[in-house]
Amino acid sequence: MQKNKSVLWLVLVVIISAVMFGFAFTPSEKKYPDLVSHTIETAETQYTDMLQVSGDISRYPRTVDSTGKTSYVPISDWTGGFWPGILWYMFEITHDSSWEKQAVKWTESLEKNQFNTQHHDLGFMMYCSYGNAYRLTKNEAYKKILIQSAQSLASRFNPKVGCIKSWNSRLSWDGHTLWNYPVIIDNMMNLELLFFASKVTGDSSFRKIAIKHAEVTMKNHFRSDFSSYHVVNYDTLTGKVLNRQTCQGFADNSTWARGQAWAIYGYTMMYRETRDKRFLQQARKLADFYINNPRLPKDKVPYWDFNVDEKGYIPDWNYAARKLSYIPRDASSAAIVASALFELGSFLGKEGLVYEDFAVATLKSLGSNAYLAEPASNNGHFLLKHCTGSFPHNQEVDVPLVYADYYYLEALLRYTKLNKKNS
């Protein structure tokens, strides 16, 4: 009898402790009772430290160098707009004006990029920075810069091809093919800038270019299973497809994880801007390929390519010289997809719950010790670990990447807004 009383007292003490102190019964819940709050607290620490070591506003944080220190890129790099965008998201999340002050400074340092016509990345460079700046401040000067940026992006559109040219001419990996008019799946992400310009100017030409690009890409960039090609090369005289290959994926016929992520996000955005159900259907099928893929790890963070080491996929580059003892993940792809799926799910009513639930599960993985940096570990002052930039180029393998952090914060914002809507 006395033994039974002791057991009852022990159970009672555990229950009272759980109620009083918020203890939970799994290790992850015990350590992180509020996943968003913990992540933002980490972000405040990391980015405060980043600002202390990043005094030169002409050098933009991108990743880490071989010693683990923050590595920077010049204004011409396609990733320059993500760091100001991160600062805008921190301001939006915390309402702390100190983040806004830094966001303004870093955003305005990119001003001359509005005239850049050398590649397709004006959306990444200018909409992630100035786009968020205008959304949160309504500063008319920012709007003018965004319009000029859209004009620069639109200048790369070829009506015969029906797409915006991504890169200037370059050779394929095998050196046998000159891509004179390469269009990469990443280009879908830059179309949002064109829609913005069309809305604020009343000039429908921007919108028409974006829609045409998305339609031609939908026709030529995807396989029957809704996996994506990375690079499609066009004939500028006829508009016909000359080559379907890869530059950052494992093989020409493989599915590069971040390419699929860009596609899911891009077509979700296209539906938002047009309400054309063709784009919604496309986004959904692209997402289904991703979330149901048997090669997707249980924690929802993909390998850098879905088909690495699989039979029937032969690289045009020297994989043997790059091969590691493990297949690196790409947390940036997971963050992009999570952000996209919160929006995609919002368009689908009850059928959207499967996408929202997948996005939540992804955020839980990214917010765990496996992927979220501990401030004491430095991680170049970035949030996420285990990203892959370009494995074939042996560049940025298993490192933090600035755009991973950007889309991770965006996903957290969308998750927070979804919770408020449902509460």
Image (spheres, rainbow, N blue to C red):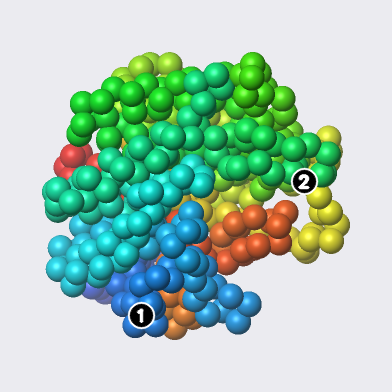
Q: Residue at x 50, y 67 (%)?
A: 73
- Examine the image and state in which quarter residue 4 appears: bottom left
338 horizontally vs 45: left or right: right
Q: Position of residue 244 (x, y in %)?
A: 70, 30
Left or right of 198 on screen, residue 214: right
Res. 166 visible in picture: yes
In the picture of the structure, the residue carrying the numbered disc 1 is 55
Q: Which mark is residue 173?
A: 2
Q: Nearer the viewer, residue 373 or 365?
A: 373
Q: Position of residue 77 (x, y in %)?
A: 49, 58
Considering the image in quadrants, where does the N terminus appear? Answer: bottom left
Judged left or right of residue 56, residue 316 is: right
Q: Which mark is residue 300?
A: none
**Residue at figure coordinates x 69%, y 40% from the top left:** 246
Distance of mark 2 from mark 1, alpha carbons?
A: 38 Å
Q: Residue at x 49, y 80 (%)?
A: 377
Q: Amino acid at mark 2?
A: Trp
The reply to whether residue 282 is in sight is no
Say few, some or many: other residues with alpha carbon within 10 Å of mark 2 (under 14 / 14 to 19 / 20 or more): many
Along the viewing direction, whichever of 385 and 204 lies nearer the viewer = 204
Q: Earlier in the sequence, mark 2 or mark 1?
A: 1
